[in-house]
Amino acid sequence: MGWITIKAMSSLALLLLIVLIVWVWLASLTCSDIALQAARDSCHHLELQFLDGTVSLRRITPFYMNIDYFGLQRTYVFDYSEDGLSRQTGCIVLQNKRVVSIIVHNH
């Protein structure tokens, strides 16, 4: 009887782990899409050329503002050009799914 309980608990723990992994993966895809759109919009607004059409996840860190606002802070980078020849790197910071900072050096 004890073996069945341990086996059932192990199966439940494995199922919960799989659900957690899928949830984190889906949240990461959503955040990547948000960062990609923010990069496109920023480049369009500043009349810059958005290069490669992608963003790249640079860092994930936990953040804590107060008891009600905490989660993961993701930093994405992307490349753009002012003149079509040079390549510069911009940065987008998301806290959970909210864009909190876009850094583009426009000369």
Image: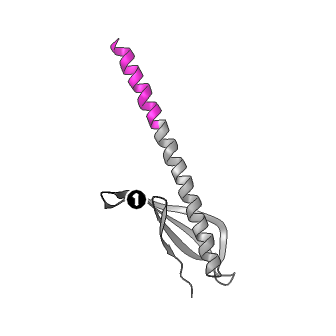
**Percent coordinates x, y for residue 90 in the rendering:** 54, 74
The residue lying furthest to the right in this view is 84
Left or right of 11, for residue 45: right
Residue lying at 62% horizontally and 72% vertically, measured from the top left = 41
Residue lying at 45% horizontally and 37% vertically, measured from the top left = 17
Is the stretch drawn in magenta largely helix, strand or loop? helix
**Extent of the magenta region:** 1-17
Q: In the rendered image of this protein, does residue 32 appear above or below residue 78? A: above
Left or right of 60, for residue 51: right
**Percent coordinates x, y for residue 74 in the rendering:** 46, 61
90 inside magenta stretch: no
The quarter of the rendered structure image containing the C terminus is bottom right
Q: 23 or 85: nearer the eye?
A: 23
**Percent coordinates x, y for residue 23 in the rendering:** 50, 45
Q: Quadrant of residue 36?
A: bottom right
Instruction: Residue under label 1, please give it.
Output: 61
- Give, as a three-letter code, the residue at label 1: Thr
16 inside magenta stretch: yes
